[in-house]
Amino acid sequence: MFTKIFTFFGSKNAAQPQSNATQENTMNSTQESRSSETVAEITPIAHLSELIYLLGRKSTDPVLLAFFSARQMKNPPKTVNANQDVKGLADPQNKLSYWFKFDITHDDFYPPVSPKQNDYTFECYLASIGLFARGKPKKPPYLHPAGFWDGYLHPDSSCAEFMAYFGMNDFAEFGVKKLSPQQELVIWFDAGRDCIREMELRIPQDCEWLSHYKFQPGNATKPFWQSPWLIVKWLFDQKLLILSDEVYQQGLPLNEEAIREFVRLYLRNHLWESQCHSHNRKLGSFFYHLTTNSSYTTHSGERISIYVNNLFMQAAGLAEKYQEMQQEEYSQQIEFEHSIRLNPAQQQRLLEILNEAWQGFQIQAIQQGKSWG
């Protein structure tokens, strides 16, 4: 699944596809221990389209429950909690794996729904299906009837067929085929072994930079609660958001309520990579350093931190004081952070600091010949 990288804002990196093959050993082992007599009674899935039909359904969907019951499998989980993130079920008969997830960065499944409203247990959906994972030696690990792959790429396809299927002019180790707005097929090719390595159906997901939690009205009691709003304002001022000329002409005042309404109307209460001009991935890398307490190295070897908490305190004129507070008890640090609110002049200063950080970051990326910063 997708690796979480932005700890401050709780974001996820969806830049490069990753498979679920490494997670399969965490599944319920009882399904693997079913007797061969029981497995033999189960009718194999006739065609890949049957699985595509299931992808994206809620775990309690009757269609999904009937599918699992017909194959004598455990029922899907009703919910997934925040610590689990994802739950998997194995289908040994068909050599498939089913993955249920709640935190899906796709507008048809977002934001996550907590039935008990405790922000811990959430409704979940069939987010991905592991179709194929080639083991060693190079032996076909699938048990599907003839015609299962008709109309799609077969696991035994050649490199030329793999590239043709995805319309590649130059070889890439994976290809993504969009099947519908809610579904995509991802295939990885192992050039060294000259064979398809893995195949997966999944819900397409975006890279989350600012989650919906960062724009909730109750955040005014939390430290640095102004930062997400001011970051959106900065993105708007720099025309880094993908918006129409008409929206930009309307302007966006430096006012929390106005920005809150703007985020609701035009950003659907979140900030994802697809909503911004990526600038050859520089902006995504910039956001990583902005939202994590990390630093990047300049062309001359200097380490620079652009962590938004530090920039926030710099705008408040409290950068040195904040550094001193890092040596104090944690409770005192938190109390200090809670006490800081930026006035309008300081808010404007933070916008200027963000722009200076962005300009400097781009210069370093160019000097080092990096498209991603």
Image (cartoon, rainbow, N blue to C red):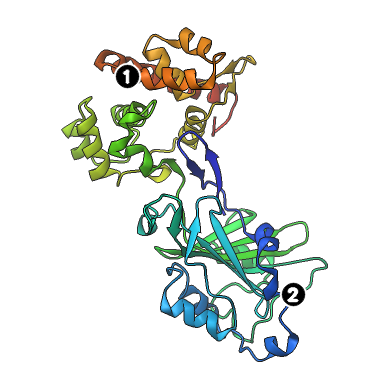
**Image-quadrant location for residue 227:** top left
Q: Quadrant of the N terminus?
A: bottom right
Query: As shown in the figure, which amino acid type bears the numbered disc 2?
Result: Pro
* Picture coordinates of residue 341, whole percent (x, y): 32, 19
Q: Is residue 224 visible?
A: yes
Q: Within 10 Å of the Cα at label 2, are there few (<14), some (14-19), or many (20+) other Cα atoms?
A: few
Q: What secondary structure is found at the residue carrying circle 2?
A: loop
Give the CA distance from mark 1 to mark 2.
61 Å
Q: Residue furthest left?
A: 250
Q: Residue at x 53, y 46 (%)?
A: 15
Q: Which residue is mark 1?
A: 341
Q: Which mark is residue 140?
A: 2
Compare residues 321 and 141 and report the one nearer the observer.
Answer: 321
- Taking 246 as reference, is 199 left or right? right
* Picture coordinates of residue 104, whole percent (x, y): 45, 55
Q: Is residue 359 visible?
A: no
